[in-house]
């Protein structure tokens, strides 16, 4: 199967980076910001109805986030899902 990649528009205008120090002295970095939006035209020029977006987010939470399988890479790969060997991001909450 062949996938065609489209560059997503990205910005960090509404992203907040939070660093938390753990008991062992190490640090964890959290990024807080908009993951997906409904009822507005997004960076790809798409518009999603609220009920459809809510269903998709609920399914993603159940299938990936709750099982610690919601991964992301630093760059957008040519495939629909992140390669665990290339993962740089773990989505812990939506």
Image: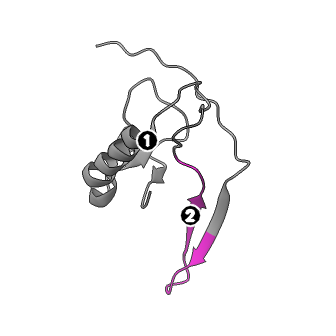
Q: Residues within 10 Å of mark 2 (few under 14, many from 20)?
A: some
Residue 32 covered by magenta stretch: yes
The magenta region covers 19-35
Q: Position of residue 54 (x, y in %)?
A: 38, 47
Q: Position of residue 40 (x, y in %)?
A: 59, 36
Q: Which residue is mark 1?
A: 86
Q: Earlier in the sequence, mark 2 or mark 1?
A: 2
The disc label shown at residue 8, or none: none
In this view, the residue in front, 25 or 30, is 30
Q: Position of residue 9 (x, y in %)?
A: 64, 30
The residue sitting at 34% across, 55% down in the picture is: 65
Q: Quadrant for residue 51, please give it.
A: top left
Query: Which marked residue is nearer to the observer: mark 2 or mark 1?
Result: 2
Residues at marks 2 and 1, CA–CA distance in whole angstroms: 18 Å
Residue 79's place in the image compared with 1, above or below, is below
The disc label shown at residue 30, or none: 2
Under circle 2, the secondary element is strand
Residue 39's place in the image compared with 31, above or below, is above
* Location of the N terminus (image quadrant): top left
Under circle 1, the secondary element is helix
Q: Residues within 10 Å of mark 1 (few under 14, many from 20)?
A: few
Residue 20 covered by magenta stretch: yes
In this view, the residue in front, 63 or 47, is 47
The residue sitting at 41% across, 41% down in the picture is: 53
In this view, the residue in front, 37 or 19, is 37
Residue 76's place in the image compared with 62, above or below, is above
Q: Quadrant for residue 78, please give it.
A: top left
The residue sitting at 36% across, 35% down in the picture is: 81
């Amino acid at each position: 199967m062949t996938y065609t990649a489209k560059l997503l528009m990205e910005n960090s205008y509404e992203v907040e980076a939070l660093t938390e120090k753990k008991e062992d002295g190490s640090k964890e970095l959290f990024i807080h910001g908009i993951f997906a939006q409904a009822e507005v035209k997004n960076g790809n020029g798409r518009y999603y109805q609220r009920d459809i977006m809510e269903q998709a987010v609920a399914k993603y939470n159940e299938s990936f986030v709750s099982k610690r399988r919601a991964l992301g890479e630093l760059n957008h790969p040519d495939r629909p899902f992140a390669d665990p060997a290339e993962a740089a991001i773990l989505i812990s909450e939506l």
